Amino acid sequence: MTPDAFVPPNLLPALPEILMACGAMALLMLGVYRSHAPARVVTQGALFVLMAAAALVLLQGGARVETFSGGFVSDAFSRFAKILILLGSGVTLIMSQGYLRREHMDRFEFPVLVLLATLGMMMMVSAGDLISLYMGLELQSLALYVLAAFKRDSQRATEAGLKYFVLGALASGILLYGASLIYGFTGTVNFVKLAAIFGDDHAQPGLGLIFGLVFLTAGLAFKISAVPFHMWTPDVYEGAPTPVTALLASAPKVAAMALFVRVMSQPLLGMVGEWQQIVVFISIASMVLGAVAAIGQKNIKRLMAFSSIGHMGFALVGLAAGTEEGVQGVLIYLAIYVAMNFGVFGCILAMRNKGGQMEAINDLAGLGRSNPMMALALALLMFSLAGIPPLAGFFAKFYVFLAAVHAGLYVLAVIGVLASVIGAYYYLRIIKIMYFDEPAEATNWPMSPPLRLIVAGSSLFSLFFFIYPMPLVTGAATAAAVLFK
């Protein structure tokens, strides 16, 4: 065989992604050429594709396998993140059906765009070099830009989509410039080769390489809506259709944070001294702003936006530790955060009257008397988001703070605890409004069976997680160990 002979890539590691791409294209053709087929059929097809992709991910072994010249990696870390992503996208599709029908948005493009965004997220967590990182990031982002503006006759949704697109394009440009600087000063984009370069004790990173690292970190921080790159989050969360907001708060956060962790823990682990101070800064800024800025919010979707900023700050505490234990804490945090968000947004989707969807926090007044089961579920989820023991949210914060303490980041852990105490105010305020305020009007909002099941499952998970946390803790430990071999 000659040195230049073509060697076909091994497609088996990328089989779930190939299935997602083919499924999305097939459903797109079904929607275009069978215009009389209801959108419900395309949605059911999308759910089937997501379940089949999840089955393929679970069937893959935990061993690290590379393909496409190292540009695509399948390992235990990517498997863990992909299962969370597929779960988040699937639950979003199930929750969205009633809303889309009521708002006359029940079109076949919605599930297809969710599939394409999910495909981009899966590529992100399996990225093995800077080029595949950028391709996955853009595939996810372009689909989410459209979804944010999916309610075409709404000025708020159009404004949200435009803001998200403009700021997202700027962040993508910053990230791409950082990647080009890293390539220019190292001569490679492959994560394994970059790790070897940065792991050399005798190599001193130049100023240009540090600039590249800063730009790359800024681009990734935008995708997880970390401060000071959070400015798009409240407006997009408020303006986007509620099911899209639920999606933005779950699967894309997992994908972006998993990508952030992989980039910092693999190719840049040798430069932990350079990037650790950056991550500590954006972690503190995100926790503090998320805790303080949400206090005055009157719209529950805007409140959840600032809540997500704060929670990403807490997750970054684990990454700042720069250890295997810290990455394990990040993965546990992401899994619990996504589970809690499903229940909260299920309750938000149920908030409606004859005039349409309701989003004001004061609309929850008196819910404890008119709909006690929904109020109880939402109260449990608010306590969990606040980190009250023994609910799941407490353990999420416990694992990242423990990793920070073991890494010697005592100040970061203390600030995190203080921010958590401040943030508890606006979660407890919602509980006070539900149980102690007089309702302005009847608030007996009915839930569809799928929504009821999702909210109940999320609440029960938050309540009983402490009884048997080992499957999640062990799975996260196995996934984290892969990045430090």
Image: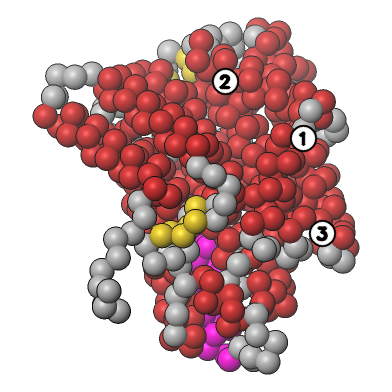
Horizontal relation, residue 302 to residue 73: left or right:
right
> Quadrant of the image for the C terminus?
bottom right
Name which residue type carries label 2.
Answer: Ile
- Nearer to the camera, 228 or 262: 262
Mark nearer the N terminus (3 vs 1): 3
Mark nearer the N terminus (2 vs 3): 3
Is residue 97 within the magenta segment? no
Q: Which mark is residue 404?
A: 3
Q: Which residue is mark 1?
A: 470
Horizontal relation, residue 25 to residue 433: left or right:
left
Residue 427 to residue 44: above or below: below
- Nearer to the camera, 101 or 76: 76
- Nearer to the camera, 344 or 466: 466
Name which residue type carries label 3.
Answer: Ala
Name which residue type carries label 1.
Answer: Met
Examine the rendering and report whether any part of residue 233 can be seen.
no
- Nearer to the camera, 4 or 331: 4
Residue at horizontal 68 percent and vertical 11 percent from the top: 373
Q: Which residue is mark 2?
A: 454
In space, the residues marked 2 and 1 are separated at their CA atoms by 22 Å
Res 32 → quadrant: top left
Q: How many marks?
A: 3
In space, the residues marked 3 and 1 are separated at their CA atoms by 21 Å
Which element type, helix, strand or loop, lies under badge 3? helix
The magenta region covers 206-225
Which element type, helix, strand or loop, lies under badge 1? helix
Q: Residue furthest left?
A: 33
x and y percentages locating residue 126 in the rendered image:
48, 55
Q: Residues within 10 Å of mark 3 (few under 14, many from 20)?
A: many
Res 84 → quadrant: top right
Residue 283 to residue 360: above or below: below
